[in-house]
Image: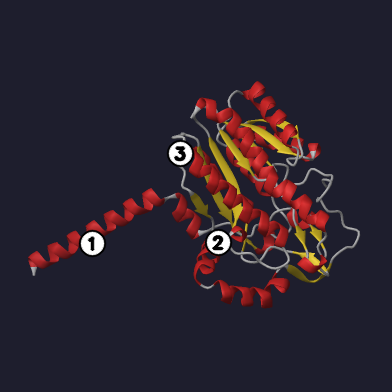
Amino acid sequence: MPNPPVVVITGSSAGLGRAIAHGFAKRGAHIGLMARNPEALNAARQECEALGGKALVLPVDVSDAEAVDAAASKVEEEFGPIDIWVNDAMVSVFSPVKEMEASDYKRVTEVLYLGFVHGTQSALKRMLPRDRGTIIQIGSALSYRSIPLQSAYCACKHAINGFTDSLRCELYHDNSNIKITTVQMPAMNTTQFDWVKNRMPNDTQPVPPIFEPELAAEVVVAAGFAQNPRREYWVGTPTVAAIIGQMFIPGLLDRYLGKTGYKSQQIPNEPKNPNAPNNLYNYVPGVHSARGKFADRSTRTSAEIFLSLNRGTVATVAALAVTALGGAILAKRRTA
């Protein structure tokens, strides 16, 4: 990969996308920051450049395919060929299906599903002629195991899996060197819970345990720089448990989440503000940040993530330990 790499990140004005931008900036990347809020994007640009990267602000709604493609052209004009494209932009609605509106589903689909499609197509348009590049889809444990109150979000994340699997098959058929991977995320302490559209009585929260976004961003950056990224990355033990649980006990999980899923996604004793802004159709003004308001309940470490990112080192250490133990046992037998 050229140095510095050229990276595009959609949804990079706040939350996980902003943390991912920070992670690539620390590696000296030149980054196209794509989202709707120019004020927040400018703040993200300043942070990235302070961390050692360069950044280009691209105020774009990813539901607009032509705007996404035009932004991709600006990145290549400014920085050169795009090496890594990260699709992360999202919106959501917390609401029972019976209270959802058709316009809610339409808008979430346009941003969260079609936004990924538009980003992927813009990346392919530029990567295929060069026969190189990596596309990273930011997924979720909820792309395998749906939960109540987030039907639009879960459906779109499932759809992204289906779209990505189809594309992966086509890339194999074409003997393409383009890499595509999905990073399935756990619940994170991001800003989305400050502005998500909410029809529930209380303010929303991620389902515990909650991870800081910087921890998850490390996996995305590692996938971007990997010569052969994995087909999927499962980030955090809760994600692993949700995906495997859905494989073996989906009916039991239906009942369990039916009993616990409403309460676990709302902050106890914090009634929602009926006048609070949401970002479904228009961005919420402000500079924002990567982290949300749950720092006191969020973890900054994960054994699963450490082991996932250091498989080779862990395997080597384990092999050496086994060899040393075997040698010690053999030596003891010889002296017995």
Question: Measured from the top left, where is residue 203 in percent x and y?
Answer: 80, 65
Question: Measured from the top left, where is residue 235 in percent x and y?
Answer: 54, 56
Q: Residue at x 53, y 63 (%)?
A: 243
Gap between marks 2 and 3 measured at Cα:
30 Å
Mark closer to the observer (2, 3): 3
Question: Measured from the top left, where is residue 56 in percent x and y?
Answer: 70, 30
Mark 2 and mark 3 lie on one chain; the one further toward the N terminus is 3
Q: Which residue is mark 3?
A: 173
Disc 2, SS: helix
Where residue 202 is drawn, which disc sits there? none
Report the residue that reaches farthest toward the right: 275
Marks 2 & 3, CB-CB < 8 Å contact: no
Residue type at tag 2: Thr
Disc 3, SS: helix
Residue type at tag 3: His
Residue 216 seen in this snapshot:
no
In the rendered image, the vertical position of residue 134 relative to residue 260, given as above or below: above
Question: Measured from the top left, where is residue 259 in percent x and y?
Answer: 68, 78
Mark 1 and mark 3 lie on one chain; the one further toward the N terminus is 3
Q: Residue at x 59, y 47 (%)?
A: 163
Disc 1, SS: helix
Residue type at tag 1: Leu
Mark closer to the observer (1, 3): 3
Locate residue 204 relative to residue 146 in the image: left or right. right
Q: Which residue is mark 1?
A: 325
Where residue 239 is drawn, which disc sits there? 2
In the rendered image, the vertical position of residue 204 relative to residue 221, given as above or below: below
